[in-house]
Amino acid sequence: MKFFLEITYHGASFYGWQIQKKNISVQETIENCLSFLLKKSIKIIGAGRTDTGVHAIQMFAHFSFSEKEILLSRNFLFKLNSFLPLNIKILNIFPVKKTIHARFTAISRVYVYRISLGKNTFYLDRSWQWLSKNKIKLNTLNQGAKILKIYKNYISFCKKNFNYKTYICNIYNAKWYIKKNILSFNIEANRYLRNMIRSIVGTIIELGVGKITIKDFINIFYAKDRNLAGISAPAKGLFLTKINYPLNINLF
């Protein structure tokens, strides 16, 4: 039987979601706890990959296990969270139809990038601390955000030396807003390339402070050259906030 895990985690102490040979990851930490409690080797498949230092308010992963009574008991969820470190929490465990895949069935993923406009000790590991005297123009940021929905090829915003079958991404929503001195960028797309959101943020911020023009920004898409885009914004400001699936993926 296939089960979904709904997960939230603070990514500062992890080298991303995916298992690595030498560094600790979120995936490995959860697999180790599940395997210990279920007395069987458990492998989970995530809905996507987050980079080192990136956080997730909502992540999903699936795995298979035959004894549903164990997993569906409230006691098991409590035990699992007790064994996991404090920076990972399993919000829910539920059975899904056997054709459902955590990654490939997902319709879209929503991320938020946060920038603290000034020194903010409470957001130190959860935002990009903007300490520059250069003022960021919100209207200009949103002009750039609207352009994102027009173009499809994001090779200029992809980390170098990563080969994909396609660099086409469909961005459904993109918007900047400010609340309590926190500048946030909300983006929803069907898929993302490695380092794509952080590259977009770094580039649009250059637009917002007047370092580049709208014309320059558009030309970056046509150039298909990562060297022309801006810096990658720090990972600590990025949050995976929501993953959307079709209705009725649950088994029951």
Image: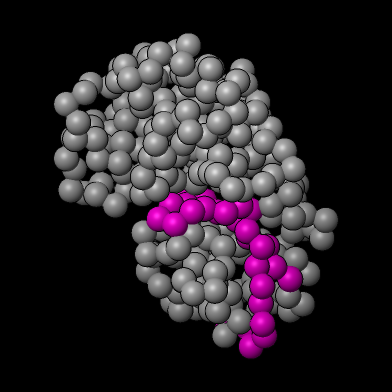
- In depth, the one of 108 and 196 nearer the eye is 196
Q: Which residues are magenta?
A: 37-64
- Res 138 → quadrant: top left
Q: Furthest residue to the right?
A: 99
Where the N terminus falls, by quadrant? bottom right
- In depth, the one of 19 and 62 nearer the eye is 19
Where the C terminus falls, by quadrant? bottom right
Q: Is residue 46 magenta?
A: yes
Left or right, 13 with respect to 5, comes to left
Spot occupied by residue 91 in the image (x, y as percentages of width and height): 51, 60
Q: Is residue 164 magenta?
A: no
Left or right, 31 with respect to 120, comes to right
Look at the picture and state if 91 lies above or below 130.
Answer: below
- In depth, the one of 221 and 97 nearer the eye is 221
Figure coloring: one colour
- Res 13 → quadrant: bottom left
Residue under the image location 45 percent in, 13 percent down: 214
Spot occupied by residue 141 in the image (x, y as percentages of width and height): 39, 20
Look at the picture and state if 186 lies above or below 125.
Answer: above
